[in-house]
Image (cartoon, rainbow, N blue to C red):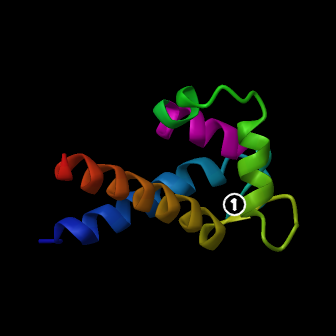
Amino acid sequence: MASQLEQSMEGLIKVFHKYSTNEGDKFKLSNTEMRLLLQAELGAFLAASRDPLVVEKIMTDLDENRDGEVDFQEFVVLVAALTVACNEFFVSSMKI
């Protein structure tokens, strides 16, 4: 039986590939695929932002090799950064 962390890692991989296989390179997220992923999987984070260009800014920030797509390694950077931010919020709320 897989541990909770192993299941989480598997879930992350499955979510990435669920969206990356829709068009073009099946191992990278296009701008459209990234938008769909963010809206479906991280909608609450997007809703908190009032910036209509938030997806484009995220794509630009993540696309380290500037190929116009986000590969799995670049995607994991986003997930890690959001996880750190959530943890910091959780820790600070526990101190109150």
Secondary structure beneath label 1: loop
Residue closest to the far right: 67
Q: Where is 34 relative to 13, above or below?
A: above
- Given residues 63 and 49, the one toward you in this image is 49
Q: Left or right: 39 with respect to 52? A: left
Residue 84 position in % (x across, y down): 42, 62
Q: What's drawn in magenta, residue-wise?
A: 32-43
Q: Quadrant of residue 91?
A: bottom left
Q: Left or right? Give the position of 11 relative to 5.
A: right
Furthest residue to the left?
1
| Image position, residue 34 (x, y; %) | 68, 46
Residue furthest front as drawn:
96
- Report the label total: 1
Residue at the disc numbered 1: 26
Q: Quadrant of residue 83?
A: bottom left
The percent position of residue 6, horizontal first and vertical second, equals 27, 71
Q: Magenta stretch: dominant SS?
A: helix
What residue is drawn where x is 57% and y is 67%?
77
40 sits to left or right of 91: right
Residue 52 in the image, given as x and y percentages of width and height? 75, 27
Q: Is residue 14 above or below residue 2?
A: above
In what quadrant of the picture does the C terminus appear? top left
Q: Residue at x 69, y 44 (%)?
A: 33
Q: Magenta segment: does it hold 28?
A: no
Label 1 packing within 10 angstroms: few (<14), some (14-19), many (20+): some
Amino acid type indicated by mark 1: Lys
The N terminus - image quarter: bottom left
Instruction: Out of 43 and 71, give the one closest to the viewer.
Output: 43
